[in-house]
Amino acid sequence: MMTLEDVKLHLRVDHDDEDDTISLYLDAAINGVANYLNAEYDDLATDPDAPAPIKAAVLLAVGDLYANREGQADRQLFSNPTYERLLNPYRVMAV
């Protein structure tokens, strides 16, 4: 789907100090998108032709994880409706 270099470019990170952390966030973001879409992680993670909105949602999630590293916050955190708008057309709904 995307490489560490793609994600670092999105995050504007030009050093290798946080590669392990960013890779963890990338895996978590792909897993989160796969769960939201009711898709298999491996299918999504290895799909080089994933649609741009799905890739954008992964980048959005990684950026959020990178910027908000702590689980506790001094303010209320809200979900980002852009994430859902990007993914909803690709979501498989169970009956």
Image (cartoon, rainbow, N blue to C red):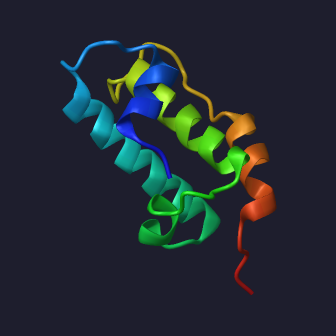
User: On the rendered structure, is 53 left or right of 38?
Assistant: right
The C terminus, quarter of image: bottom right
Q: Nearer the viewer, residue 68 or 27?
A: 27
- Residue 15 percent location from the top left of the image: 26, 14
Residue positioned 49% across, 26% down in the render: 63
- Residue 8 percent location from the top left of the image: 40, 24
Q: Nearer the viewer, residue 39 or 84?
A: 39
**Residue located farthest toward the bottom when viewing the structure as drawn:** 95
User: On the rendered structure, is 60 left or right of 13?
Assistant: right
Quadrant location of residue 38? bottom right
- Examine the rendered structure and indicate whether residue 83 appears above or below residue 43: above
User: On the rendered structure, is 42 left or right of 87?
Assistant: left
- Examine the rendered structure and indicate whether residue 12 appears above or below residue 57: above
Number of dots carrying numbers? 0
Quadrant location of residue 25? top left
- Residue 40 percent location from the top left of the image: 49, 73
Residue positioned 63% across, 64% down in the render: 37
Residue positioned 47% across, 32% down in the render: 6
Quadrant location of residue 33? bottom right
Residue positioned 55% across, 43% down in the render: 58
- Residue 86 percent location from the top left of the image: 75, 45
User: On the rendered structure, is 57 left or right of 73?
Assistant: right
